[in-house]
Image (spheres, rainbow, N blue to C red):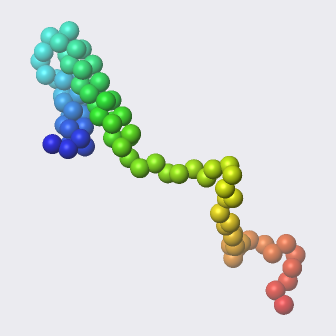
């Protein structure tokens, strides 16, 4: 079972625990244990996802060119 499938299954179990019919102490314990499992799997998935590289301070930022939209005024310049 993949981690994402396990995460979905644990999420469903966390939603069903309050309606399970277990005694109150057991429900609380199951909720905490299942929640900790969801948290752990979420951390693992987050750590394994590729990270976006932030531009370093010694590298120049890529140049971008912004063109004005057609609806913007041309600051008093007539298009003759």
Q: Is residue 29 left or right of residue 52?
A: left
Q: Relative to 80, say whether 32 is above or below.
A: above
Q: Residue furthest left?
A: 21
Q: Is residue 40 left or right of residue 14?
A: right
Q: Total number of numbered labels?
A: 0
Q: Relative to 62, say whether 77 is above or below.
A: below
Location of residue 44 in the rendering, given as x and y in whole percent from the top left corner: 33, 36
- Dividing the image into 4 quarters, which one contains the N terminus? top left
- Residue at image position (81%, 75%) is 74
Location of residue 15 in the rendering, given as x and y in whole percent from the top left corner: 23, 30
Question: Observer-nearest residue: 20 or 38?
Answer: 38
- Residue at image position (13%, 15%) is 22
- Dividing the image into 4 quarters, which one contains the C terminus? bottom right
Location of residue 3 in the rendering, given as x and y in whole percent from the top left corner: 23, 41
Residue 25 seen in the figure: yes
Give residue 21's quadrant in the image.
top left
Question: Observer-nearest residue: 25 or 62?
Answer: 62
Location of residue 48 in the rendering, given as x and y in whole percent from the top left corner: 36, 43
Q: Residue furthest bottom?
A: 80
Q: Is residue 59 left or right of residue 28?
A: right
């Amino acid at each position: 079972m993949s981690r994402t499938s396990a995460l979905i299954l644990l999420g469903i179990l966390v939603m069903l625990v309050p309606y399970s019919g277990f005694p109150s102490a057991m429900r609380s314990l199951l909720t905490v244990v299942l929640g900790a499992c969801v948290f752990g799997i979420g951390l693992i998935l987050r750590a394994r996802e590729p990270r976006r590289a932030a531009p370093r301070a010694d590298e120049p930022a890529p140049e971008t060119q912004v063109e004005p939209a057609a609806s913007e005024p041309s600051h008093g310049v007539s298009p003759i």
